[in-house]
């Protein structure tokens, strides 16, 4: 594993004092993949989510212009955050709560696709704008199911059931909208495409192809563009969120990403794909802090902050810091460094 060189720029939390943290001061190197480890109750989430994120979410980005800033909560001060344009907590919560949300809309390529269809000869002759190819507004969508492709039927004493729309048969659009084709495919056909198929189909459209290629790179090539967001697993939703950030590129400015145990529920192969996305975010000039106990993640990190030594009143301290190689050479091992040493030795 190739480690990034140590950084001199630090994000410094001074005298954190919340829950079991007792005036704990910690320096987090920027521009690296930083993992915060420790046993349950050691103070990881309190330090990162409650103190760090809890304070900086009102000081970085759009919230900073609206918030009336006072003293720091749970610590004396935090320094070194001024260079960030955005702060993002990336978790496994769904990317949308209704079937109207799907990967194509979330990653921001759906409006581009609608513009392509609106630019076809048939659409121009009919006077169709890009709005005609939206399943969320009246005009081009199927009005029977209101663009959802299914209809929900209320049952008096049972749970509601969803049935395929008898008008559009799940295609979500009105018949006149489906008369318009691009490369012999309708807008409904595009929604049914997998990410891999769509990446090839839109190979000539740079922005769309780039975003779809990123989704394929992190192992989501099997998802369909129109798959309802609530049906995505937590791990899939998390990778979609990270790809959305990757697609922004360097023009979006520097960001601080915080992930809390992102490997929960992920298969070993999916963990590898998640790590690949994290590394690309850092290569794009961002900083990533991950609260994690998974040894695959800890071994991949550039820098580890190990909390402990135990949980509850026996925790709240920084027991070790450094690269994985530096931590396993320590004479006094913590629970984490002992397990990491065995893992790296294998």
Image: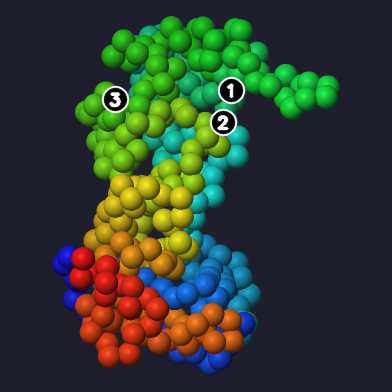
Q: Secondary structure at mark 1?
A: loop
Q: Where is residue 333 drawn, in percent x and y?
A: 34, 85
Instruction: Confirm whether residue 265 shows in the render.
Output: yes
Residue at the disc numbered 3: 197
Instruction: Sort mark 3 into few (<14), some (14-19) or many (20+) by Cα contacts within 10 Å.
Output: some
> Could you tell me how far apart the alpha carbons at marks 1 and 2 are, in whole angstroms?
6 Å
- Mark before the other along the chain sequence, 1 or 3: 1
Q: Secondary structure at mark 3?
A: helix
Instruction: Sort mark 1 into few (<14), some (14-19) or many (20+) by Cα contacts within 10 Å.
Output: many
Residues at circles 1 and 2 in contact by the CB criterion of under 8 Å:
yes
- In the drawing, what numbered circle is on residue 148? 1
Position of the N terminus by quadrant: bottom left
Q: Is residue 269 left or right of residue 72?
A: left
> Could you tell me how far apart the alpha carbons at marks 1 and 3 are, in whole angstroms?
22 Å
Q: At 16% across and 67% down in the image, what residue appears?
A: 2
Residue 304 sits in which quadrant? bottom left
| Count of number-bearing discs | 3
Position of the C terminus by quadrant: bottom left
Q: Look at the picture and state if 134 lies above or below 101.
A: above
Q: Look at the picture and state if 174 lies above or below 106.
A: above
Q: Where is residue 223 drawn, in percent x and y?
A: 39, 32
- In the drawing, what numbered circle is on residue 100? 2
Residue furthest left in the image: 2
- Mark before the other along the chain sequence, 1 or 2: 2
């Amino acid at each position: 594993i190739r480690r990034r060189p140590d950084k001199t720029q630090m994000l410094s939390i001074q005298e954190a004092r919340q829950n079991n943290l007792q005036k704990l001061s910690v320096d987090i190197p920027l521009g690296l993949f930083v993992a915060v480890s420790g046993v349950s109750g050691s103070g990881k989430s309190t330090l990162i989510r409650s103190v760090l994120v809890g304070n900086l979410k009102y000081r970085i980005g759009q919230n900073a212009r609206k918030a009336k800033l006072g003293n720091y909560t749970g610590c004396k001060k935090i320094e070194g955050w001024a260079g960030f344009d955005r702060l993002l907590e990336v978790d496994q919560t769904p990317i949308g709560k209704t079937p109207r949300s799907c990967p194509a809309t979330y990653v921001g390529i759906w409006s581009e696709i609608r513009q392509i269809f609106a630019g076809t000869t048939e659409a121009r002759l009919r006077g169709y704008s890009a709005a005609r190819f939206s399943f969320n507004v009246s005009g081009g969508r199927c009005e029977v199911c209101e663009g959802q492709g299914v209809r929900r039927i209320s049952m008096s004493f049972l749970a509601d059931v969803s049935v395929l729309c008898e008008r559009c048969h799940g295609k979500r659009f009105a018949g006149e909208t489906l008369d318009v084709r691009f490369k012999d495919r309708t807008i409904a056909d595009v929604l049914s495409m997998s990410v891999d198929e769509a990446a090839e189909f839109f190979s000539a459209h740079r922005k769309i192809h780039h975003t779809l290629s990123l989704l394929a790179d992190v192992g989501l090539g099997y998802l369909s563009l129109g798959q309802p967001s609530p049906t995505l697993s937590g791990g899939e939703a998390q990778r979609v969120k990270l790809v959305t950030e990757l697609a922004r590129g360097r023009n979006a400015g520097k960001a601080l990403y915080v992930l809390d145990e992102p490997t929960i529920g992920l298969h070993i192969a999916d963990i590898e794909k998640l790590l690949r996305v994290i590394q690309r975010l850092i290569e794009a000039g961002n900083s990533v802090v991950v609260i994690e106990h998974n040894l695959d993640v800890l071994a991949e990190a550039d820098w580890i902050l190990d909390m402990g030594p135990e949980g509850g009143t026996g925790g709240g301290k920084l027991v070790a810091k450094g690269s994985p190689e530096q931590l396993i050479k320590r004479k006094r091992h913590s629970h984490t460094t002992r397990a990491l040493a065995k893992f790296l030795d294998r």
